[in-house]
Amino acid sequence: MTFWILISLTALVVAALLVLALLRGRSKDEPTAAYDLRVYREQLTGVDRDLARGVIGEADADRIRTEISRRILAADAMIRKEAEGVAQPRGVTWVVALLLVAALMGGGLMLYRSLGAPGYGDLPLSLRKEIAEERRLTRPDQASAEAEQPERPKPRIEQQYAELMEQLRAAVTARPDDLRGNILLAQNEANLGNFKASYEAMAQAIRLMGDDASARDYSEMAEMMIAAAGGYVSPEAEAALQKALDIDPDNGPAQYYWGVMLLQVGRPDATFRVWQEALRANPAPAPWVDAIRARIEDVAARAGVRYDAPQPASQPGPSAEDMAAMEEMTPEARLDAIRGMVAGLSERLATDGGTPEEWARLIRSLGVLDERAQANRVFHEAQQVFAGDDAALALIRQAGQAAEILQ
């Protein structure tokens, strides 16, 4: 109620000032002939003084008075004419004034109803933090988030690789305490986009490792949980991230997803601080660094902070000399050279990160080389890296279609 009283009084004061200015009209402070009129009246007084002192005679005084009076009449007529020239119709003025008040009050109300939040209480920073914490504690769990996800398209993989995966699954089912088998299963399920099976296998591997589990193990499990939930950081994924950060506070992937979690519950200010510290502590390029750089400026703006994230220099592709040399190779040698370039690009993107165009080129190249399982893994990783960047995601999806890993 206090807000409405204050905003209504403010609108009324502004409207009153505008109406007052309108009613007073736009006139000069003083007509141009007013100064002349004051001079002529002073001259009349001077004539009487000169006559009393005997400076001039009666006849001269009458003649001077007559001339000054004529000038006074002329100046007065000019003042009247100027006053009539700036006068404005009172009826029209009142109509315009009422329309102005209606537009200011009614238009302001309509604009607020459209853009504002009528009935919404004030949200001081302390209350916003309380709401964010409550949202964090009551948000859906991992199973609920997975249940809401649409069915993922099945990747096209080689028959031999599919048979090997079935053998690996059967072997891990028969020997659930096989640490190496669970790690391999988690990695390969992730390559196929089976993120639920991936994080379940990784969770079993972490249980087998016990206290030897590293921050990387926990962050990779959390990443697969987040991927299975469509980018949503559940309480279970948060717990895995917390374990990773407890072991290594500078674990980059965990810092990135921790910031994502804070952003999802309504704390862009905390996200900005976490991501800024992550960039400071980990200056080397990496996929998660690209993801932070792609979003941190928007997060900073939402947190009310002005921030310009430094952008890394893009890495060049093969030179013209390399392409010319490949033209002279035999088909087998050319294929080996292409595989070497693709491997080099894959390794660089995995360690240093890169642009959306480079990720798309790697996906297409793996499709050409018929390594669709690897292409599918890179495709999903690129989606995580450029989450929120619609232009980059469109480029990545086009590459996935070209590599025939999307049905």
Image (tube, rainbow, N blue to C red):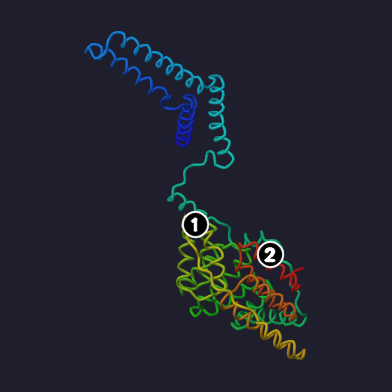
Judge from the rendering whether residue 188 lies leftward or rightward of residue 264; answer left or right.
right
Q: Residue 194 carries which label?
A: none
Please count the marks in the image: 2
Q: In this view, does 347 lie above or below 333?
A: above
Near mark 1 (Cα within 10 A), the count class, few <14, some 14-19 or many ≥20, is many
Near-viewer residue (35 or 270): 35
Q: What residue type is labelled 2?
A: Ala
Name the side, left or right, on which 58 lies relative to 173. left
Q: In which quarter of the image is the C terminus?
A: bottom right
Q: Earlier in the sequence, mark 1 or mark 2?
A: 1
Spatial CA distance of label 1 from label 2 is 28 Å
What is the x, y in percent for residue 3?
46, 37
Q: Which residue is disc 1 drawn over?
A: 267
- Crowd tier of the residue under label 2, counting other residues whose Cα lies within 10 Å: few below 14, some 14–19, many 20 or above: some
Q: Where is residue 4 in the image (x, y as percent from the top left)?
A: 48, 34
Q: Is mark 1 on a helix, strand or loop?
A: loop
Quadrant in the picture for residue 392: bottom right
What's the amino acid at mark 1? Answer: Arg
Q: Which residue is drawn at 53% across and 62% down?
A: 261
| Of the pair 70 and 404, the residue shown nearer to us | 70
Residue 326 lies, with reference to residue 265, above or below; the image says: below
Taking the image as shown, residue 204 lies to the left or right of residue 154, namely left
- Circles 1 and 2: CB atoms closer than 8 Å: no
Which residue is tagged 2? 394
Q: Where is residue 155 in the image (x, y as percent from the top left)?
A: 74, 72
Q: Where is residue 34 in the image (x, y as percent from the top left)?
A: 39, 22
In front of the other: 151 or 322: 322
Location of residue 356 by image quarter: bottom right
